[in-house]
Amino acid sequence: MRLILLGPPGAGKGTQAQRLVQKYRIVQLSTGEMLRAAVAAQTPVGLQAKDIMASGALVPDEIVIGIISDRLDQPDMKNGFILDGFPRTVPQAAALDELLKKKHIKLDAVVELRVNESALLARVETRVAEMRARGEDVRIDDTPEVLSKRLANYRSLTEPLIHYYSERRKLLTVDGMMTIEHVTREINRILSAIGAVEPKVAKPAVSAKKAGGAARKTAKPAGKKAAKTAQKAAKAAPKGKKAASSKVGKAKGKAAPPARRRGTAKAKKAAKTTVRKATKKVTKKRAKR
């Protein structure tokens, strides 16, 4: 994904760029941040740009183009990038197109954050007041006075880029006056709509060889278990037959007598017992006499 964010100073380009970086794992190329870092480090380029930035004027093209060209050659650029704050003029856009063409890099889209200038000035005034209340340092190019001048430069120099990229069918416009969350959702929606967002790559299917190997591995343990079970069953079969035969033999030897015979035997025993008792009584009476 390779994008350019357009919009006047204070439109929220830096905030949206950071969100895109986190979501799509791409690199933010903010010329403003690179130049401010150079100023802080007091490099030759930074010293050249310091007075220009303090006055609110634009940094010369040759300085910015050189920074971008070197940065595009870094290995972390393979997933894509977002250019924030560049190009600012039609000549810069033409120079960038030429640079990208030489490096065989395709630009996917130019996202314009359209905002109201009066609202921007109010935002900056509020932000500066809050920073001073917290005791924080205010950037020299982040005051209402400097912003007014930068907005005038934007109208005269940068707004023609809207027409430039619109003719090339690269321009996508988003209402920058919405909340940060709404702006983010709208940017993601239009990027998906134009196909700038690469679809997630599905995990590769298991190859036939691997699938066959896995099936064989699964089949082997199952086959071994089945063989063992069959062997146990075969050993147990003769034992089962012997046990069954012995049980049948015992059952034949111990066949229960018919119900009538059992009843007759009981009756005979009862009769004998009665006779014995009667005989004993008679014997006792005779003995008494």
Image (cartoon, grey):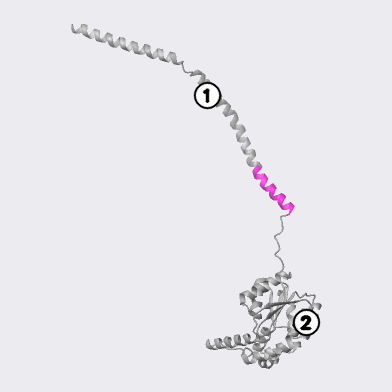
Element at badge 1?
helix
Decide: is 45 above or below 209: below
Q: Amino acid at mark 1?
A: Lys
Q: Residue furthest left?
A: 289
- Callout 2: few (<14), some (14-19), or many (20+) C-alpha neighbours within 10 Å? some
Counting from the top left corner in percent of width and height, residue 69 is at 76, 81
Look at the image and tell me in which quarter the C terminus lies. top left
Mark pair 2, 1: CA separation: 104 Å
- Read off the residue under disc 2: 164
- Read off the residue under disc 1: 247
User: Where on the picture, by quarter, is residue 38?
Assistant: bottom right
Q: Residue at x 55, y 25 (%)?
A: 244
Query: What range of the chain is rendered magenta?
Result: 207-222
Counting from the top left corner in percent of width and height, residue 237 is at 60, 30
Counting from the top left corner in percent of width and height, residue 201 is at 71, 63
In the image, taking residue 286 as reference, residue 113 lies left or right, namely right
- Callout 1: few (<14), some (14-19), or many (20+) C-alpha neighbours within 10 Å? few
CB of mark 2 within 8 Å of CB of mark 1? no
Badge nearest the viewer, 2 or 1: 2
Name the dominant secondary structure of the magenta segment.
helix
Q: Which mark is residue 88?
A: none
Q: Residue at x 73, y 85 (%)?
A: 159
Look at the image and tell me in which quarter the N terminus lies. bottom right
Along the line of sight, the residue nearer the viewer: 284 or 154: 154
Along the line of sight, the residue nearer the viewer: 241 or 262: 262
Q: Residue at x 69, y 74 (%)?
A: 26
Counting from the top left corner in percent of width and height, residue 213 is at 71, 50
